[in-house]
Image (tube, rainbow, N blue to C red):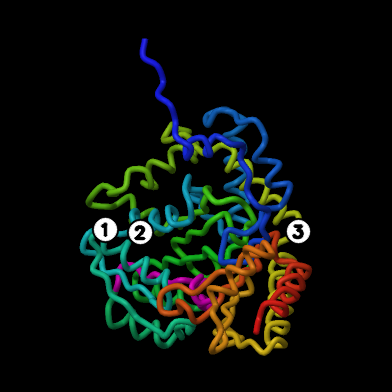
Amino acid sequence: MMQASSIDNTQKLQLSPLDTPSRLLLGPGPSNAHPTVLKAMNTAPVGHLDPAFLRLMDEIQSLLRYTWQTNNPMTIAVSGTGSAAMEATIANAVEPGDVVLIGVAGYFGNRLVDMAGRYGADVRTMTKPWGQVFSLDEIKHQLNTHRPAILALVNAETSTGARQPLEGVGELCREAGCLLLVDTVTSLGGVPLFLDEWGVDLAYSCSQKGLGCPPGASPLTISPRAMSKIQQRRTKVANWYLDATLLQKYWGRERTYHHTAPINLYYALRESLRLMAEEGLENCWKRHQLNAEYLWDKLEGLGLSLHVEKDFRLPTLTTVRIPQGVDGKAISQKLLNEYNIEIGGGLGELKGQVWRVGLMGFNSQKENVDRLIEVLQKVLP
């Protein structure tokens, strides 16, 4: 009989009980989850085809439709992080050779470009400096120039803190005969969204930001108009795991096995959506806006400047210009290591130039703003 080999000290350390610090997560995500949501995750799992779990899936769908203000039958939670839901929109809607026009004004616009190219799209871009947004006239001109099958826009650019207005864009897309795909990763739950009213055909989000839930169960919605394009594809969806025609059979009436869902994450998502519905969408949006404005005033009171013009700032995420001569990374590390507060640094073109401060979901509270400002007063030169 073979004996187990001895283990080194590194492996021994890994066998110690889990011991993680308690942080206030005020970065670009994840955010802290509501205690009720964390409690739901501790519930004993059932099978992923258990009638009780199937009812919970129905509840998630209904709550997501409310949160997004849509009646799309194909509204589900992808078993994966927000990037999986992001890729699901591209994988399903894009066929090789499709012209896809993407608005790039930040890091996640560029990610859409990368994904669409991998699925064989003829990618075209319209660009803006990071932190700015596209006007309706600019969008109309680009649609007329490129005549795309899909227009993709980032409603909430997590790298810049800018909110891209969507009113009127869906109408332009219908005039141009294309689908409208929208990133709502940092807006769902914290920013007014009216997908049906605005003519949005595909949208995705995540669970760990405005919804105040741990990452891993990510909202995805597809309009009947977009599903029609998917069902008429000339080629199979290249990504089996994210194929909407297969996922539809699991989430729809057929309840055909597709994959083992992350049961406890779905418990948490259901509870986070229930809490939002209990608060009321309009109240939730208002809370995020008021707390963001309180944060902006306090930051400017410290002599700090904000990167995005006020009319287009996200209430869920604020980009703060790092003052000249200040080591932004050192300040972030000091906040984390000495005060257990996490804020984010810049991505891409804004690396080293901004801090990113998130007030999302359960964390959007005036008390959290006060705590951050109190500590910044101590650590800033």
**Magenta run includes residue 215:** no
Residue 317 against residue 63 in the figure, above or below: below
Structural crowding at the residue carrying mark 2, measured as other residues with C-alpha within 10 Å and reported as few (<14), some (14–19) or many (≥20): many
- For numbered disc 2, what is the local secondary structure? helix
- Tell me the amino acid under the disc marked 1: Tyr
**Residue 7 placement: quadrant:** top left
Q: Observer-nearest residue: 264 or 169?
A: 264
Start-end of magenta stretch: 148-167
Q: Observer-nearest residue: 339 or 76?
A: 339
Structural crowding at the residue carrying mark 3, measured as other residues with C-alpha within 10 Å and reported as few (<14), some (14–19) or many (≥20): few
Q: Point out the tag, 3 or 1, that comes first from the N-terminus.
A: 1
Q: Which residue is mark 3?
A: 279
Tell me residue 94's x, y (percent): 30, 59
Q: Observer-nearest residue: 271 or 255?
A: 271
Tell me residue 184's x, y (percent): 52, 65
Q: Which residue is mark 1?
A: 119
Residue 117 against residue 245 in the figure, above or below: below
Q: Point out the tag, 2 or 1, that comes first from the N-terminus.
A: 2
- Tell me the amino acid under the disc marked 3: Glu
Q: Residue at the location (44% across, 43% down)?
A: 248
- Tell me the amino acid under the disc marked 2: Ile
**Magenta run includes residue 161:** yes
Q: Which residue is mark 2?
A: 90
Tell me residue 169's x, y (percent): 46, 76
Is residue 70 visible to us here? yes
Q: Residue at the location (68% across, 87% down)?
A: 300
- All told, the count of numbered labels is 3
